[in-house]
Image: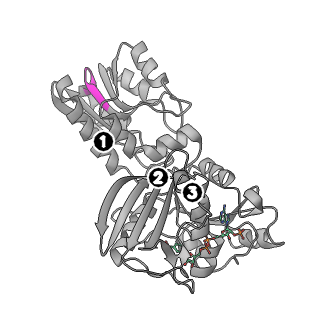
Amino acid sequence: MRERDEELMLRAIALARTARRRTAPWPAVGCVLVRDGAVVGEGATGPYPDGPHAEVAALRAAGDRAAGATAYCTLEPCDHHGNTPPCTEALIAARVSRVVVAVGDPDDRVAGRGYARLLGADISVQIGVENALAERDLAPYLHHRRTGNPFVVAKAALSLDGRVAAADGTSQWITSDEARADAHELRADSQAIIVGSGTARADRPSLNVRDVYVEPMRPPLRVLLDARGRVAPEGPLFDSSLGPTLVISTHESRPGSVDAWAAAGAKVELVAPGPNGQGVDLDDAFGVLGREGVLQALVEGGGRLLGAVVEGGHAQRVVAYIAPVLLGTDGAAGFDYAGPRTIGEASRYRIVDVARVGSDVRLQLEPPKEAI
Ligand SMILES: NC(=O)c1ccc[n+]([C@@H]2O[C@H](COP(=O)([O-])OP(=O)(O)OC[C@H]3O[C@@H](n4cnc5c(N)ncnc54)[C@H](OP(=O)(O)O)[C@@H]3O)[C@@H](O)[C@H]2O)c1
């Protein structure tokens, strides 16, 4: 059996992927139960907030055949009463004999207690099988539970010379239809989509998810960062039929703006101003989103917000769609911030994926730990 651990964990990971876009703020988990070499039950996390956890779904499918089985779980089974009872109790009650786990759960309420409970019931536990793959799939969840903040993805559609808009502010469209469709998949994987006030005013964006392969269970939160109340509560961004809207502003916002946003149906949160009084404090803003249960937040620009996000080291991932078009020095910088004084101080990102999308190239990058 043990020689098939990797293969069976890969099956559990594939199952977990079927649950994506429906579980946040829960993780998307998969579980496979195997007895005498045969799969006797399997399951993935059901929709938040009422769906069964993956282990419970698999146990239900297996019935009596779970006794003596090995459970392959992509995440450490939970050991607390949340919306559903603890999975450890269900595994113990079903008398499984062995539990194989890919990734430990950093959630304060689990964090090793799941393993301890199983070991205390004489169930053998093995940890870390296909760990790297499961960690990658669960990255937003793990980051959220470790830090309280969302996993931040900074996305930009850039010209070859790194511009996000032409001299007159137009940016629709720098990239191809295919690249924009791909960016909608990114939106669908996120629970919040964020723009700065400059983009809200220039583009009047909808920030909703359109034409994706798998619709998210709930539309992402559309987030506007507007420290001074410059964006009027009108247009698609405040059309509640397209999704919920959250405005993050400061006490320095223009008189009446907070009431007007709220009257338009938006939720409003006030945080501290950013460094030098510019914009909103991004640590505070991401803290608000973390408390809202946002596991992955997609920052869509414009250039000034993206500059502040990378300068402050807030992004865990950068996704750049690069189009074969030149916009010149009068175009708007994609990451608009002062940058390093000398090349030795420049942040060097790590490319984690390169793909051709339509007529463009998509780069996925991981910032250095101390990004500037
Ligand atoms: N190609 C692309 O991918 C893409 C995507 C989006 C936008 N765009 C283009 O980008 C242009 C707009 O970019 P932009 O640079 O003018 O505006 P922006 O980055 O969308 O918004 C900047 C404004 O956001 C507010 N803000 C709040 N908190 C902030 C923070 N912590 N850091 C930075 N800003 C913060 C600030 O105004 P307050 O101080 O008043 O709050 C700031 O002036 C448009 O032409 C648009 O078409 C291109």
Q: Are marks 1 and 2 in contact (CB under 8 Å)?
A: no
Q: Is residue 262 left or right of residue 294?
A: right
What is the C-alpha distance between the residues marked 3 and 2? 13 Å
First in sequence: mark 1 vs mark 2:
1
What is the C-alpha distance between the residues marked 3 and 1? 44 Å
Q: Are marks 3 and 1 in contact (CB under 8 Å)?
A: no
Going by the picture, which residue comes out furthest to the bottom? 168
Q: Quadrant of the N terminus?
A: top left
Corner quadrant of residue 354: bottom left
Q: Which stretch did the figure color magenta?
A: 66-72
Residue 154: % across, % down: 50, 60
Q: Look at mark 1 in the image and give the residue it sits on.
A: 13
Q: Amino acid at mark 3?
A: Thr
Residue 369: % across, % down: 52, 44
Q: Amino acid at mark 2?
A: Arg
Q: Look at mark 3 in the image and give the residue it sits on.
A: 342
**What numbered label is drawn on residue 348?**
2
At 60% from the left and 81% from the top, the residue drawn is: 202
**Nearer the observer, disc 3 or disc 1?**
3
